[in-house]
Amino acid sequence: VVKAKYKKNYQIWLKFNDGSEGVVDLKDELYGEMFKPLRNKKMFKSFRVHPELETLVWKNSADLAPEFLRDHLTV
């Protein structure tokens, strides 16, 4: 992941280093100890692209594997 932009609800537009891009909807993925706090939209919107991990990370240390994000990408 080289770029990410909040779209709406729990959707994020992503661009990968190979040029592919699309939207991932994470509304059904926010469960468990690390991800449940991200149901709060203010917290959800606080993501950033980690320059070394090349994936999304949040302030509470939650992150998602780029492979997972690509698998859930819609155009």
Image (cartoon, helix red, strand yellow):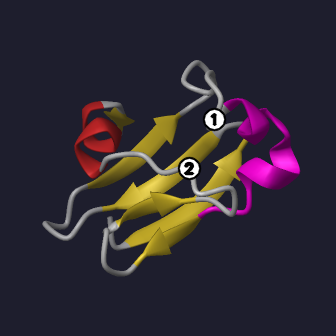
- Residue at numbered disc 2: 62
Q: Is 2 a magenta residue? A: no
Residue ID at (72%, 63%): 46
Asked if 58 appears above or below 69 in the picture, the reply is below
Q: Residue 49 location, x and y as percent? A: 47, 71
> On the picture, is 44 further left or further right than 25?
right
- Residue at numbered disc 1: 35
Q: Amino acid at mark 1?
A: Phe
**Residue projecting furthest to the left:** 18
Number of disc labels: 2
Task: Specify start and end residues of the magenta stretch as a single range.
Answer: 36-47
Residue nearer the viewer, 4 or 37: 37
Reading the chain from its start, which is encountered first: label 2 or label 1?
1
Q: Residue 17 location, x and y as percent? A: 20, 70
Secondary structure under the numbered disc 1 in the rendered image: loop
Asked if 64 appears above or below 16 in the picture, the reply is above
Residue ID at (26%, 63%): 16
Q: CA distance from mark 2 to mark 1?
A: 7 Å
Tell me which corner region of the image, top left, top right, bottom left or bottom right, holds residue 14. Answer: bottom left
Tell me which corner region of the image, top left, top right, bottom left or bottom right, holds residue 1. Answer: bottom left
**Residue projecting furthest to the bottom:** 51
Secondary structure under the numbered disc 2 in the rendered image: loop
Question: Are circles 2 and 1 on residues that touch, CB within 8 Å?
Answer: yes
